Amino acid sequence: MSSAKALHEPPHDCALCPRLHDFIAGWRDREPDWHNGPVPIFTPKAGDDAVRLLIVGLAPGLRGANRTGRPFTGDYAGDLLYDTLLRFGFARGRYAARPDDGLELVDTAIINAVRCVPPENKPVGAEINTCRTHFFAPALARFPSLRAIVTLGLIAHQSTVRALGGRVAAHPFSHGGRQEIAGLTLFSSYHCSRYNTNTGRLTEAMFVDVFGAVERFVANSE
């Protein structure tokens, strides 16, 4: 890893958030073969300069990214997200829910607002703020060609707005929303979690519609 990239990646035993650190330490004892650490940004092989779209999730799932070490890999949210990215050309290959499945992103990167898995999938405000200050906000500077960001869920959206220097009240979250901030276009969607799809809050068609709008925007901004 280059020194520039290392600035935006937490150490594997990051202890800035004691509650998250202790939670992961417990899972390392229980599942020593899992990743069990901050999940790094998933970037395309073409490198950071190629990234025009950034997808922001909330935090790693316990048996998803926390287990596999790749964002949205190994749980239902990943099934829906990666199928949609493949559909619109933001990824290529085949998603098989493993970090070695050969799936590649195309001009796209994926990051979580909170890099470590939280108990019950619920980070607290101090943890969100700490990860944004130390890792999320600085990471945005990695991508000089960035044009659009998709935020998945309220917390990811609010943390992104703050990372870009905006006011949450001026950039409220709404599914299918589109806003301009800091020279970027911000798209928002309900999180693609199993809970949201099972309850009908988010349908596959609703999710696809968001990424259809993203695809048209990115194509027209070349």
Image (tube, rainbow, N blue to C red):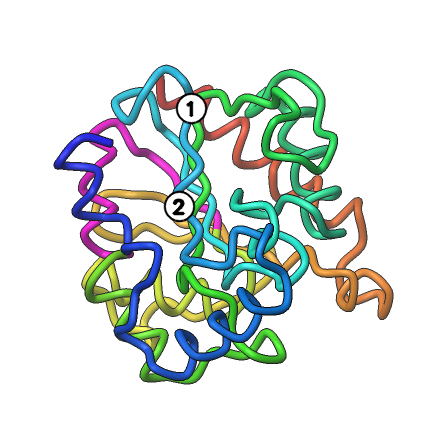
Query: So how many labels did they put on this image?
Result: 2
Residue at 32% x, 77% y is 17
* Depth order, front residue of 173/146: 146
Q: Quadrant of the N terminus?
A: top left
Position of 222 with respect to 139 (left or right) is right
The furthest residue to the left? 3
In the rendered image, the vertical position of residue 17 relative to residue 109, given as above or below = below
Name the residue at 57% across, 57% down: 32
Which of the labelled discs sits on residue 44, or is there none? 1
* Nearest the eye: 113 or 19: 19
Disc 1 is placed on an element classified as loop
Residue at 21% x, 38% y: name it.
5
Q: Which residues are magenta?
A: 136-150
Secondary structure under tag 2 reads loop
- Above or below, 34 against 47 in this view is below
Between disc 2 and disc 1, the foreground one is: 2
The percent position of residue 25, horizontal first and vertical second, equals 47, 72
